[in-house]
Amino acid sequence: MTHVARLAGAAQKDAGRQARVDRRLGASPFLAAPLRRLGYDSRELWAWDNYQASVLGFVDHCRMTGRHDGRLVRVLEIGGGRGPLMTPPEAADAGIAYAVNDVDARELAKGPAEFEKVQFDVAGDVDPALIGRFDLLISRMVMEHVRDAKRAWTNVSALLAPGGVAFAFHPTLYAPPFLINWLAPEALTAPVLRFFFTDRNDADYPKFPARYDLCTAEPAVIEPALRRAGFRHVLSAPFWGDRYFRHLPGLREANDALSAAAEARDWRRLASYAYTIGAK
């Protein structure tokens, strides 16, 4: 193959990827705008590397659309516990009034004292005083753990002020690592996870049972569910690829090949992660 042919093939491949990206973000140009500005490209590493920047993009989005209180955007992080996404100085610099939620009082107690803390189960009863208080609700690797995702999303919608935005980053079924985690007993998956990811321990980053209720990147599933929960605009931005098999030659390459094929064909059921976003 000539150099010119290789360049032409690469350009065609990039054009194909861009066309797929455009289709994936086409469901809601309104919600896609912050992701487009950051160069969303459907790769798993992009999701991790750009999550905080994406949150800040939605903070600006809220501010520009009038969703704020005295220029402070009111953010609640669901399941933030001991390790919220932002530090107090970062939140102050971004003009955020930051609150952290967790179901576990012990987890909340380990978080920054400067942040407001609210203890409740997002899939359970919510204090009526919190209803409509927030402009942006965020969560990172939380929604796969809730027992009743429909009720959780309904509560998230209720916690938002009119026009507010919910932004959840979560794994999805049926990517092989998460399918295994879903089907295998916790007594088996917890030690395996801690072997490959040394920070996944009770002292640093505990592992909680995963249920994967409504954890999908399929628009036909997630969009009606969120609309029933009270959201007017819904966007599912999928990501393919993961690093769970990175120490297992052979299995690693097979998993990478499957992810690449699934991305190229837009097989949402084999996406690994998603940004699920809704605007009230």
Image: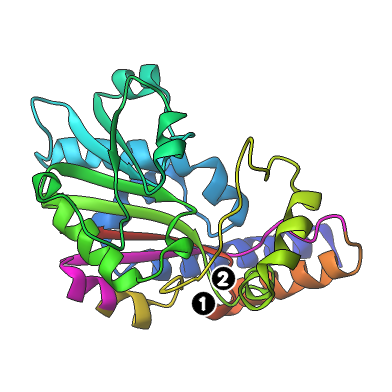
- Cα separation, mark 1 vs mark 2, equals 5 Å
Question: Disc 2 on helix, strand or loop?
Answer: loop
- The residue segment tinted magenta is 225-247
Report if the CB atoms under discs 1 and 2 are less than 8 Å apart.
Answer: yes
Q: Classify mark 1: helix, strand or loop.
A: helix
The residue that appears at 35% across and 70% down in the rendered structure is 149
Q: Residues within 10 Å of mark 1 (few under 14, many from 20)?
A: many
Q: Which residue is mark 2?
A: 271
Looking at the image, the residue that sits furthest to the bottom is 220
| Residue plotted at (29% across, 49% down) | 120
* Percent coordinates x, y for residue 276 in the rendering: 37, 61
The x, y position of residue 180, in whole percent, is 69, 74
Q: Amino acid at mark 2?
A: Ala
Seen in the picture, residue 243 relative to 147 is either above or below; the reply is: above
Q: Which of the pair 80/57 is nearer the observer?
A: 80
Residue annotated with mark 1: 268
On the image, the x and y values in percent for residue 71 come to 13, 26
Say whether residue 8 is magenta. no
User: Which x, y percent locates residue 215?
Assistant: 45, 70
Q: Amino acid at mark 1?
A: Arg
Q: Is residue 187 left or right of residue 33?
A: right
